[in-house]
Amino acid sequence: MSTMVIGYDVEDRTGSDITRRFLSKASELHAELQAPATLFLVGITAENNVEAIQRAKEEAPFELGSHNYSHILLKTLCQVKGDGIVEIAQGGSLGQLVAEVDKANTVLEREFGVKCRAFCSPWGYYRGISDRPDLLHLLHVAGIRVMRTWMRNAQDWIPVDYDVQPFFYEPQGFPDMLEVPVTVRHDCNWPVHYGFEPQEYANPQEFLDYLRSELDYLHERDWLYNAAQHDTTTIEYDPDMVIMRGLIEHARRIGMEVMNFTQYYDKMRASKQ
């Protein structure tokens, strides 16, 4: 059965009220629709918003996952732009990443009593971390079993082809670790425009109409739709959460399941047995 999983990157580290405003609106929406979702928390952001996160978790069907402690990248990116210019975004050392993952998990357990199973990497990477068994081992030891790390194409850019669907890291020796890629257009480019060049949209409603067509395409093939948004871009460009409301309502109208990441992991594990 086709499925939509929802994951929010909660990562504002400016000291503003963006995260609290986002959590308030997201909780209201998800409580009303009773739609599960995963909040992928940057550890620093979680420490600065403990009460708001706890309240959101009590009010809406949210689970808490990790987005690293201070948003250090797992891998170095070489982004190839349209003009051929390559920009480098540096990944952390293995030692830094061990500390990042452990500190983030410590925050989740200390503040919210959560033993983390779901992880979203900062930025995302081509092929996820299928080429990095050392990182898979790091996350596995930390208790991570479902992750969102494949979010870029061979140019380290967005989007990823639709047919890159969830898979277990079995060839790498981690058959109980599930990758849940992001293949659809998401909110990373909202500061420039809704959608991606050359097609642009004037407002959230027009962009939602386009995203519904992507949802239909994936549903017809019994594939996954990974809905990815951030606290920052949501508040700045779609504060009423028109897009997410419309996606949830449309998914249910066409018969897609709506899940958080751990629910989807459990479904996929059960299908292997």
Image: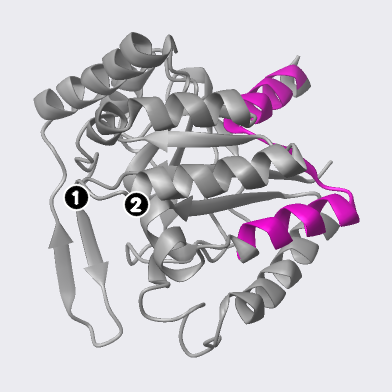
Q: Is residue 234 visible?
A: yes
Name the residue that disc number 1 marks. 14
Q: Is residue 179 left or right of residue 273?
A: left
Which quarter of the rendered picture does the N terminus lie within?
top right
Q: Is residue 65 visible?
A: no
Magenta-colored segment: predominant secondary structure: helix
Give the amino acid type for the residue marked by disc 1 in the picture: Thr
Q: Is residue 65 left or right of residue 47?
A: right
Q: Is 266 a magenta residue? A: yes
Q: CB of mark 2 within 8 Å of CB of mark 1? A: yes
* Residue located at (36% from left, 18% from top): 108
Nearest the viewer among 59 and 222 is 59
Which quarter of the rendered picture does the C terminus lie within?
top right
Nearest the viewer among 75 and 102 is 102
* Residue located at (42% from left, 66% from top): 158
In three-dimensional space, the C-alpha distance between marks 2 and 1, rounded to whole angstroms, equals 9 Å
Name the residue that disc number 2 marks. 18
Residue 221 image point, x, y percent: 81, 56
Please tell me how crowded label 1 is: few (under 14), some (14-19), or many (20+) other residues with Cα within 10 Å: few
Q: Is 172 a magenta residue? A: no
In the structure shown, which secondary structural element does the residue marked by tag 1 occupy? loop
Which image quadrant is residue 178 in?
A: top right
* Residue located at (19% from left, 50% from top): 14
Total label count? 2
Q: Which residues are magenta?
A: 243-270
- Vertical order, 118 against 37 (above or below): above
Residue 243 image point, x, y percent: 62, 64
Residue 201 image point, x, y percent: 56, 86
- Vertical order, 47 against 236 (above or below): above
